[in-house]
Amino acid sequence: MKEKVMNGLEKFSKAMLSPLSYISAAGLILVLGALLTSTSLSAMIPVLQWTPIKLLGQLIYNCIMVIINNLSLMFCVGIAAALAKKNKQQAAIIGLMSYFMYLTAGNVTLTQLGMLAEADPMVGLYGTGQSTVFGIQTVDMGVFGGILLGLVCGWVYNRTCEKQFKGIITQIYSGNRWSFTCMVVFSILFGFGSCFFWPPVQNVISALTDLIATSGNFGLFLYGFLERFLIPTGLHHLIYTPFQFSALGNSLTVGDATYTGSYIVMMMEYSMGLPFSDGIVWMYTGFTKTFGYFGIVAAFIFCARKENRKKTAAVLVPLAFTASLASITEPLDFMFCFSAPILWVAHACISGLFIVLLHIFHVTGFTTNLLGSVLMNLSAGADKTNYPTLYLLALCQIAVYFVVFTLLIKAFNLHTPGREEVSTETAGSDAPAKKASVKNAAEVQCVIDGLGGKENILSVDNCFTRLRVNIKDPAKLDEAAINKLPNSGIVKKGTDIQIVYGLQVADIKRAVEAQLENQ
C-alpha cells in the first residue's frame, strides 16, 4: 500500500512539473514586463514613460500574465498529457475540450436554475463565488478544478484509448474517440456538480474571514496562514479579497467620497501624503512573496546534493526573483506543496507569524514587490512606514525560512529539488555532473538496450533534468549500456527508472522516442 501511494504521489508530482516547467522561463520575462510598467520606477526613470517603451512593457507583462491567470487550464491540459502513456497529444486535446465542457456545463446549470450571479458595477463578481473564465461565467473553483479534471482525463485516457468496437457506427467511438466520449460524460457531471458541492466549501472560507476579523493577533496569524496554505486549492483569494477590497479591511472618507478596502485606502493615503492606518496590515500577504521565498530557495539549494546545486540554483533562483519582483509564487509553491506537505505547513505558519510581527512592531509600509516596496517606502518616509524595521524583519524571515526548511528537509530526508537519489554505481555523493549530449543513434540505442529493449519499455517521459522510464522487468536493466551516453546518475524505484541528464534531457527524450518509433 505504501509503495502504491508513493508511486501515485510520484506520478502526480511529475505531471505537475510538466506545465510548471514553462513558468520558470516565463517568470523572468514577466519580471521585465513588471519593471517596464512600474509606476514607481518610471517616476525615477522618465524614459520609461516613453510610449513605445510603455507599450512594450504592457505587451510583455499582459501576454505572460494571461498564462499565470489561467493556470487552471494549463494544469488540466498539462497533467492529462503528462499522465498519458501514449499519444500524449491526443490526451492533451481531450483535456482541453474537457475543460471548456466543464466550464460550459457549470454556466448552463447556473443559468437554467436561476443561480447565475449578476456582476456589481464596482466589484464585479466578488463575493458571489463565481467567476468568468474565457468569457464563461461559472462557479469559481480556481486551479483545483483544472488539476482534478486533468487527473481524471489522464486516468480515463490510459484505460480507454485502446478500446475497439465492432460495427460501422460503433467504430466511430473506438480508441481516442471513446476516451473523448467518456470525458464528455464526466465533464458535464463535474461542471453540473460543482454548482452544488463547491459553494459549501466557499461558505466555510467566508466564515473564517469573519473569525479572522474579530480575533486580533490570532486572526492575523490565521489570515497569513490560510492565504498561503490554501494556494493549492485556489481558494486563497477568498481569504484576502474581503479585506483588501471591501469595508471589512478598512475605509477612508475624504470629503463626500468614501474609499473601502485596505488596498484602495493604502493607495489613497499614499497619494495624499497621509499617515498609513492600521488597515494596511491586511496587505502584508505580499511580505512573504517579496522576501521569504529567497530563504526557501536558499534552503533547497543548500540541501541539494553537491553535484546538483548548480543546476538547482539555475532553475530556482529565477523563480525566487519572480516571486519577489512580480508576486508570482505558484511555480515554486507547486514544487513542494504536494511532495513535502510538512514544509508546506511550516511555510504557512511562518507566513502567518511574520504578519503578526509586522503588526506588533508597528510597521505600516509597502511589502509587495521588492522594487515597488523600496521605492514607495523611501518616498513615503520612515516616519510613516517604519521601513527600517520592515527590512530587518525581512532579513529575519529569510533566515527563519532557511533554518526551518533545512532542518525539516534533513530530518525527514525530503525529496526537494536537487535531492533526488542517484545510484552509487554511477554517481557518488561527490561525483561531478556529466554533460549529456546525443551524438549519434548508436548511443541512443545503447540507452534503449540498457533499459531492456523496446519490448521492455512501457513509457518514456522527462522532468527538468531526468529521463523517466517505466519498464516491465527491472532484471533486464543494464547500467553499463545506459552509461555509454554520459549521465549523472541512475535512480531505480522498482519499474520506474530515472536517468539524470541535466538540462539536455528533453533532447535526449526526443531522440529515444524517435529511435523507438523506427524499430
Image (spheres, grey):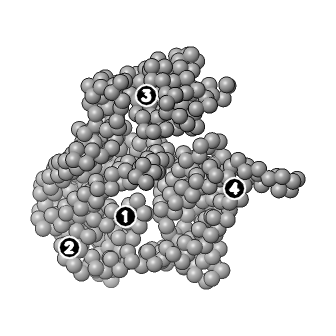
The residue carrying mark 2 is 218
Task: Give the amino acid type for the residue marked by disc 4 in the picture.
Answer: Phe
Mark found first going from the N terminus, 1 or 2: 2
Residue that mark 1 sits on = 230
Q: Which mark is residue 190?
A: none
Q: Where is residue 314 in the image (x, y as percent from the top left)?
A: 34, 34
Q: What percent of the width, then of the height, locates residue 411?
A: 21, 47
Q: Where does the image place residue 126, in percent across and percent down from the top left? A: 45, 74
Mark 2 touches mark 3? (CB < 8 Å): no
Q: How far apart are marks 4 and 2 (CA)?
A: 49 Å
Residue 180's mark?
A: 4
The tag earlier along the polypeptide, 2 or 3, is 2
* Mark sitting earlier along the chain (4/3): 4
Q: Residue at x 63, y 59 (%)?
A: 98
Q: Name the residue under label 3.
A: 501
Q: What residue type is labelled 1?
A: Leu
- How far separated are the C-alphas under marks 3 and 1? 34 Å
Q: Disc 2 to disc 3, how far (Cα)?
A: 48 Å
Q: Which of marks 1 and 4 is nearer the N terminus?
A: 4
Which percent across, then down, holds residue 399? 16, 48
Looking at the picture, which amino acid does disc 2 mark? Phe
In this view, the residue in front, 253 or 189, is 189
Quarter residue 513 falls in: top right
Residue 253 in sight from this viewpoint:
yes
Q: What element carries label 3?
A: loop
Tell which circle, 3 or 1, labels the residue nearer the N-terminal end: 1
- For marks 1 and 4, give the one nearer the viewer: 4
